[in-house]
Image (tube, rainbow, N blue to C red):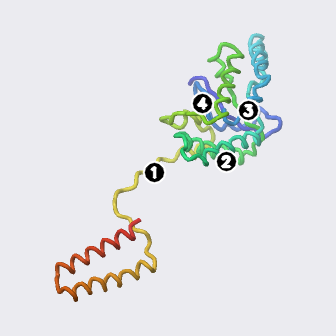
Amino acid sequence: MGNRSALILSASTPPATDQTLSFAFEGNNFVPLFWFAAFPAEAVEGWEAVWHAHLAAMERQEGYPDTTLWTPWPEARERLAALAAYLNQMHRKPGWAPLFHNWHNALLTLAEARQAQWLGMELREIFAFHEDPAAMVSDTLAGIGLWQGIPELPTPEHPRELSGDPSDSITATYFSAEPEPPARAGFRFRRLKLNDWLMIPAMAVIVLGVWIYTQSLALTALALAVVAFGFYRHVKS
């Protein structure tokens, strides 16, 4: 099982914790790094006090306050779009860039389908890996700060190490496709155009001319092989 984290969307303003929530992705014993790219450091202001209130409520066995880290979805969407645009402009993309684009597109599709207004990170169970609320805040700010530049992330063995596990049928479709098989070796030719077809009678004239001039089967066969190879190179894709 493990300690779960969740990236969630809320269709209500302010964000709610009822049926208006939509889980987009989940993590198991960690917080996927792509999630932090959607949040600003300002979102963490005052969050440490929330965690202190949460711990106090646990001791008193009272109802827990909402510890989810929230940011408005329209602002998160702009931050992610800016990062995606930057990656598209790079001459040399990081190895994880295609994984980010896939995760980003999945999140956009789900947010539109659910009419999202807020994006949240539910990290209540992840708190168990921290000594106190200050350590939780520090690690969260470090994750957000990672995206102030373009981090040198290694390409993971599985994309979910960075994106998390999809928790909705919409996002799951982006991660269910099998990799395309490598193209089979062989010859492929592009579709012939009119100019390509006109080359054939011209080549025939050349070969016929060689035969008439030399009366040599060997030279004529050589001429045929040369023009045929030239035509093959011309139309091969």
Depicted 207 relative to depicted 94: above or below: below
Mark 2 and 1 residues: CB-CB less than 8 Å, in contact?
Answer: no
Please tell me which of labels 3 and 2 falls first in the chain.
Answer: 3
Q: Is residue 161 visible?
A: yes
Q: Are marks 4 and 2 in contact (CB under 8 Å)?
A: no
- Pointers 1 and 4 in contact (CB under 8 A)? no
- Residue 136: horizontal and vertical position, in percent? 68, 20
Q: Amino acid at mark 3?
A: Pro
Q: Of the two numbered discs 3 and 4 on the same chain, state the one appearing first in sequence.
A: 4
Residue nearest the viewer, comparing 200 with 13: 200
- Label 4 is placed on what type of residue? Gly
Kindly identify the residue that appears in the image at 45 percent across and 51 percent down: 180
Q: Which residue is mark 3?
A: 40
x, y (%) of residue 86? 64, 45
Res 150 label = none
Against 72, is 179 above or below? below
Q: Which residue is the site of mark 2? A: 109
| Amino acid type, mark 1 | Glu
Assign a secondary structure to mark 1. Answer: loop
Distance of label 3 from label 2 (alpha carbons): 22 Å
Mark with earlier residue (3, 1) = 3
Image quarter hosting the N terminus: top right
Q: Which residue is under mark 4?
A: 27
Q: Residues within 10 Å of mark 2 (few under 14, many from 20)?
A: some
What's the CA distance linking mark 1 and mark 4?
26 Å
Residue at the image position 40 percent from the left and 51 percent from the top: 182
